[in-house]
């Protein structure tokens, strides 16, 4: 004969299992983001199986990026930035079989955002490695992608973008305005 407390124990156990499962998924997500960065790369975040975001990426890291399965590289760095080495990066990317997409900006524009959205939506560019100097500009464009292409809500997308590297108030303002968010 079942006791009165049996139903309570079953419900409590079910809730506990749900919490454990949710924690497991969270840990798995965090672990996925901790994948080892290619040598010399700063602020590396593996977002999912199709995208990694990063800061400064030396030309010498491109062969490893290709070896890690990436099909393309998007670079938001200006040619005048110290260590950008755009021409050498383009040549090395071509040599190792990476498509190289250079979308340089300091001050974001709708045209850069549109070009990025087009590139990131193209399946032939995936998996995609996206970088700038610190991952700040990457975070801004990634926020736009999450809201415009993936349908994420603004708060969720902003939290992820900040985790990737978005810090600058002017980039946040541009990204929020671009997606039409009121804050």
Image (cartoon, grey):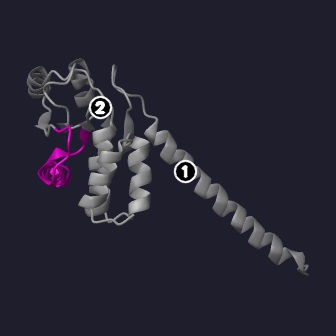
Locate residue 28, reporting x and y percent: 52, 46
Q: Is residue 52 left or right of residue 101?
A: right
Q: Which mark is residue 68?
A: 2
Q: Does the magenta portion include 130?
A: no
Q: Nearer the viewer, mark 1 or mark 2?
A: 1
**In contact (CB < 8 Å): disc 1 and disc 2:** no
- What residue sits 15% from the left and 52% below the top? 122
Going from N to C along the chain, the mark reached first, 1 or 2, is 1
Highlighted magenta segment, given as a residue range:
105-129
- What residue sits 21% from the left and 20% below the top? 82
- What residue sits 13% from the left and 22% below the top? 92
Vertical relation: 9 (above or below) 42: below
* Other residues around mark 1 within 10 Å, as few (<14) / some (14–19) / many (≥20): few
Residue identified by numbered label 1: 26
Q: Secondary structure at mark 1?
A: helix
- What residue sits 26% from the left and 53% below the top? 174
């Amino acid at each position: 004969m079942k006791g009165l407390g049996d139903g309570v124990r079953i419900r409590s156990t079910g809730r506990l299992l749900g919490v454990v499962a949710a924690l497991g998924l969270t840990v798995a997500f965090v672990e996925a983001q901790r994948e080892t960065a290619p040598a010399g790369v700063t602020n590396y975040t593996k977002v999912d199986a199709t995208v990694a975001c990063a800061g400064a990426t030396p030309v010498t890291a491109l062969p490893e990026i290709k070896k890690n399965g990436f099909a393309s590289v998007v670079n938001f760095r200006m040619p005048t930035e110290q260590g950008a080495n755009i021409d050498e990066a383009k040549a090395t990317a071509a040599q190792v079989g990476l498509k190289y997409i250079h979308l340089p900006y300091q001050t974001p524009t709708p045209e850069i955002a549109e070009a990025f959205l087009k590139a990131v939506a193209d399946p032939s560019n995936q998996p995609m490695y996206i970088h700038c100097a610190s991952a700040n500009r990457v975070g801004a464009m990634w926020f736009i992608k999450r809201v415009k292409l993936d349908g994420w809500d603004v708060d969720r997308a902003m939290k992820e973008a900040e985790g990737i590297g978005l810090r600058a108030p002017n980039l946040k303002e541009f990204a929020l305005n671009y997606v039409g968010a009121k804050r």
